[in-house]
Image (spheres, helix red, strand yellow):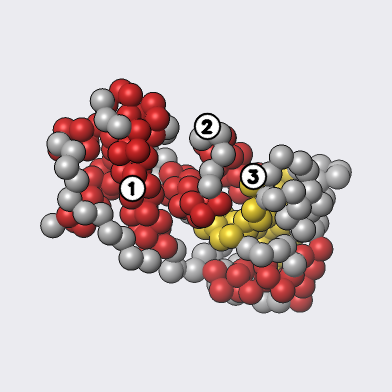
Amino acid sequence: MMVRMRKSRLSKSKQDKLIEHFVAGTTARCAASLVGVNFKTAAYYFRRLRELIAHHTEQAATEAFSGEIEVDESYFGGHRKGNRGRGAAGKVPVFGLLKRGGRVYTQIIPDAKSSTLVPIIEKKVIPDSIVYSDCWRGYNTLDVTDFKHYRINHSKLFADRKNHINGIENFWNQAKRHMRKFNGIPKEQFQLFLKECEWRFNNPNPKTQLNQIRQWVRGILK
């Protein structure tokens, strides 16, 4: 992914304020009003920040997970409930893996079939790791792979001691809560917002987020 961020005509102080508002989760429209810039200027700047985040998040996602891993799919957008695994009602299906006590990784998927999900798990998770999932049929073939596979039946209970997927479900809730404030995200930009949510989850300290973005912006403008 190529990231182009030309030198802005905005003053350094206004750029710093926009970055601070971005880290705080402020919408571009609100940030534009508070900083005193045009809405289109703020929206353009925020999009470039998301492109930077997506670029660095993808670079950091090359290392495979090991240990205890939670896997799950979720559906974003749309106005009506759709059948699971079919991405109905205009929803975007997303697959996620979370290493307990560590990072989350997300990927937009065409569907939630086993032929889609299992290759991602095999690529991102080291053999002999423990994989937790729910009872969706897309995970059936995990039972005959090199992973130790445990299922939690959500029709009966949400956790059975260590057998649960509460961590990845917590991420989905955070991501959807963050995206809701934008009142609809263009489909062509959804990947950028998704990677932003992944980055925020993996770097929960706002000071760390602020320092990272400032460093990336300085690096690309040199």
- Quadrant position of residue 122: bottom right
Which of the pair 101/49 is nearer the observer? 49
Q: Nearer the viewer, residue 214 or 81?
A: 81
5 sits left or right of 59 in the view: left
Tell me if residue 37 comes above or below residue 122 in the rendering: above
Q: Residue at x 62, y 56 (%)?
A: 94
Q: Residues within 10 Å of mark 1 (few under 14, many from 20)?
A: many
Q: How far apart are labels 3 and 2 at the CA level? A: 13 Å
Q: Earlier in the sequence, mark 3 or mark 1?
A: 1
Q: In the rendered image, which quarter is residue 33 located in?
A: top left
Number of numbered discs present?
Answer: 3
Question: For mark 2, what is the residue?
Answer: 181
Dot 3 falls on a residue whose secondary structure is loop
Residue found at x 28% / y 59%? 4
* Tag of residue 49: 1
Q: Which residue is mark 3?
A: 77
